[in-house]
Amino acid sequence: MTVIIVGAQLGDEGKGALVDRWGGEADVVVRYQGGDNAGHTVVEDGEEYKLSLVPSGSVRGKTGVLGNGCVVNPRTLFDEIESLQEQGLDPDVRLAERAHVIMPYHRVFDNMEEADKDESGSGTKVGTTGRGIGPTYEDKAGRRGVRVGDLLDPDVLRDRLEYTVPQKRAIAEEVFDVDTGVEFDVDQLVAEYAAYGERLREEGMTVEAGDFLYEQHADGANLLFEGAQGTSIDIDHGNYPYVTSSNPTAGGAAIGSGIGPKLLGEGEIVGIVKAYLSRVGSGPLPTEMTDAEEDLANKIREKGGEFGTVTGRPRRIGWLDIPMLRHAARRSSFTAIAVNHVDVLAGLDELKVCHQYDLDGDTLRTVPATTEEWAACEPAFREFETWAEQDWSAIVEEGYDGLPAAAREYLGYLEEELEAPVYAVGVGPDRDQTVERETPWE
Ligand code: IMP
């Protein structure tokens, strides 16, 4: 069967712990979008593994697939694989030949355009991770990208780069007035990237991913699709332009892996929700804690470890936003949800949830399409009873009914609003600190 894990908010919902936990029953873990802009830490037998590109199941000996919807930086990929090998693992990672390659000039473009947007005072700076994600997807859509399959043939690779690189260099130098270096040197790029291709071939790492996954599924394998980022930063369904350049929503799993929507629709689609909001990067956040709530925001930030995994930036903090979650549940057809960081909210003096928005006198139950309208939305809050600190390990043993009544009330409200049952509740960062009601594989 198939299970898709989707971030229901702005990324950083704690998907990693659940992908890791439920990955135990998967045979193949698939990433279908994004690249090394994601980031999570997997802890296995007390050992910490930091990953931003390699699918987390690889730590558990599963086959990891980077689907055609991903953008792959071979430098990061091999660095991560080598670190895992140094830690005693032998990860089995396959790459879609149709996936696009992040080239060094894509990172230059990412940072250059961000700096330009910043200096222009246009307010359009996104606060990207600087990993070259957007510029790589731009080249994909512009039909001038380099695909993983192209790395396997140095002549094809050279042809692609000889067409593209002079244009990139000219834009960097003449439009953005930036000095260019080795990132734009075709000979050096061909030498380095053809060597990656050689290594991929020698190690048998490239596949026609759609066929590979289709056959695995036909043989009865369990496929886990690991969404990166989240619904509100989806290029189509997020708050454009403060978005990433791919589709974290469930539909992205079909496009980005080559498995059709009918087959995926027979499986489960689990939305991962954090019990409050955090945002790294620019863009509106209607429920962002106010200056008067600064102490509370700091407390949550510290307790929840709300600092970017990839960038280390402190994240902005907000109250749970139900219109955002209704939007996510509808876009991805959640069959279930998992709610994380319920322990972080313990011991607060107050607990608020935005039930709906007020926009110029109208009531909105979901997110409006333009970012300007979304920024103008006034949250209408509902107060919830708070819960005290608990012996969370004992509750993990006891199960869902062991959760404090106030927390169950909060979770029940979410189930009702999102029309999906809660399968799991995160009460700590480790995958074992999860109160599990049901697994999606049942
Ligand atoms: P990019 O994906 O690097 O282009 O960044 C675009 C936006 O997505 C920025 O606001 C980033 O902070 C955000 N973003 C990218 N990846 C993640 C993630 O894994 N978690 C949370 N936010 C992310």
Image: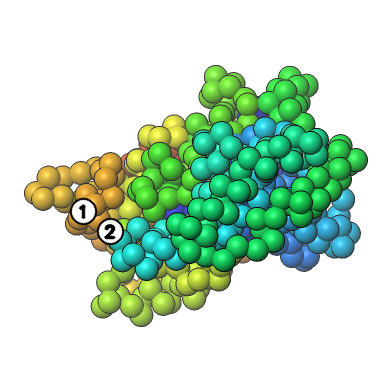
Identity of the residue drawn at 40% across and 39% down: 236
At mark 1, the secondary structure is loop
* Mark 1 residue CB less than 8 A from any atom of ligand 1: no
Tell me if label 2 and label 1 are in contact, CB under 8 Å: yes
Q: Position of residue 145 (x, y in %)?
A: 61, 39
- The residue singled out by tag 1 in the image is 377
Asked if residue 67 shows in the view, the reply is: no
Quadrant housing the N terminus: top right
Residue 420 pos. (x, y %): 43, 37
Going by the numbered disc 1, the residue's amino acid type is Cys
Near mark 1 (Cα within 10 A), the count class, few <14, some 14-19 or many ≥20, is: many
**Secondary structure beneath label 2:** loop
x, y percent for residue 19: 63, 47
Please, what is the three-letter code of the amino acid marked with disc 2?
Answer: Pro
Per the rendering, the mark at residue 286 is 2
Q: How is the image coloured?
A: rainbow
Establish if 287 lies above or below 322: below
The residue positioned farthest toward the left in the image shown:
361
Q: Residue furthest bottom?
A: 295
Give percent across and percent down for residue 167: 56, 47
Instruction: Specify the quadrant of the image occupied by residue 261.
Output: top right
Q: Residue at x 79, y 36 (%)?
A: 155
**Image-based side of 346 in relation to 262, left or right:** left
Looking at the image, residue 357 lies above or below residue 116: above
Q: Is residue 196 left or right of residue 296?
A: right
